[in-house]
Image: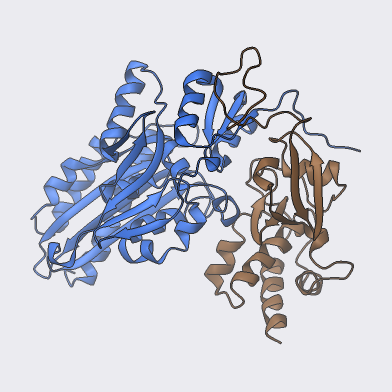
Amino acid sequence: MMEQENRTSFPKVWQPADLSEAWRLKHMLGDAAVYTAGTTYLRTQWEAEGAAPPGHFIDLCSTGLLAGIELKDGELLTIGALTTLASCRSSALLVNHVPVLMEAVRAIAAPSVRNLATIGGNVASTFGDALPALLVYEAQLVWYDGKLLQVEPLADWLAGLRHAAANHAAKDNRILKEIRIPIASDSDVDSGMRLEMYKKIGRREAFTPSLVSVAMTGRIHQDGLLSGFRIALGGGGAIAQRLKEVESLLQHANYTQPLLGTIYDMIVENAELQGDLFASALYKKQTAANLILSALWRAAGQAGMH
Amino acid sequence: MTDNHAMKQGAPQVTSSMISSETSYTLDCDVNGEPVSMKVQPSRRLLFILRDDLQLTGTKRSCEIGRCGACMVLMDGKPVNACLTMAYQCAGKKITSIEGLSGRGVHPIQQAFLDEGGFQCGYCTPGMVISTKALLDDNPRPCKAEVEEALSGNLCRCTGYGGILRAVYKAIETADG
């Protein structure tokens, strides 16, 4: 028996020649159209979550938008928005310069999905698991707004998303062109042991949507001094966020067991994680706090603190 | 840039290339070593092109959201979920389904699954074999973590994975001679 695809109407596919045309299409077709690349996440929305499929795909792969990863002048890592997650996963540049992002990519979906899915799509989804990792590296986004390219700190874009969600603001029709990550030179980095961590907790061991994802970078010195910590949370549909209060507390603090308790309470209080059908907000906050504390505790042990 | 659709009523006034019409879009690709040229909706999924249009039913339909791996095929040698991949994404690509893996014979990876009992109901097996093929073509001697990552997109509800992992290691040994 034939198993015909159950579709009365297929989305129309547009393949614009460049970004300008893609933007004009989106401007004219409005909410009926979506920008697409790998389309892996988008498809789950209408296959698994009951949403109606969009009327139009605007395929960015035809625009000449660049895919690829480059290190420019030894200080700026650029990742084209159309770079597949599989290309990220096999990138020596990511391993060497942004290992937290590499670990995040490894934890996203499975190899077959990563062969289609793009880093730009993961970011543009607004809650992809790469976002906490990109936040701790203080990534910047390069957007095309129909006329010009704009560079925007990822943190600002995420803050704008929170504001827009709260105020039902109009959707952003800009096209993500590139992700930029500033790379610290050796002279910028003080001594001490580097701590670089990404952890994703889901309901399965592998290939699972996240309940919580945590990214952290920092340094622990032999005398117990902590420095340069950046910590970000995301996962489970939450908009990724930096934990600035915790970072400030850790800056130039000395590692102690009581400090861990203070941090735990602060994370549970400040983390903006919402409950869902599978886990309460408190569970997610406590999970995030435990992940951060255990990573600090392990690193302190490696540095001879206990 | 040309477009004979753009001036239709309701269509945006741009000179873009819309490829949406089944009567106007032709998918040209290679399936199991044979050239394929067919009129198809550009957003039709590869899963249904293989199973319904080309009668290649070894590629299995299951979750349809890229989670189970039963529909795994190779696209230019890389594993992709046929349920996620649309016709226009296959243009100019080389698609290999389970039927194309070994022609008329049994591929050494398939033989390893037979030898080690790497299946029970068999529904996930074509996808498992395809993912194993992609792994070993890219990395002939993978470590345990690499095997587990390569198969992380393939679910099996029968075997508990023990037999499948034995089959993969057997395939590695066989390839090593």
Q: Nearer the viewer, residue A137 or A78?
A: A78
Residue B121 visible within the image: no
Q: Quarter of the image holding residue A302?
A: bottom left
Residue B169 place in picture, x, y as percent: 66, 76
Q: Quadrant of the C terminus of chain A?
A: bottom left
Residue A25 place in picture, x, y as percent: 51, 25
Vertical placement of B26 versus B32: above or below?
above
Vertical placement of A283 versus B133: above or below?
above
Q: Quadrant of the N terminus of chain A?
A: top right
Q: Which chain is blue?
A: A
Residue B107 visible within the image: yes
Q: Is residue A220 left or right of residue B164?
A: left
Q: Residue at x 82, y 68 (%)?
A: B102
Q: Nearer the viewer, residue A8 or B113?
A: A8
Q: Residue at x 16, y 57 (%)?
A: A257
Residue A203 place in picture, x, y as percent: 51, 46
Picture colour scheme: by chain
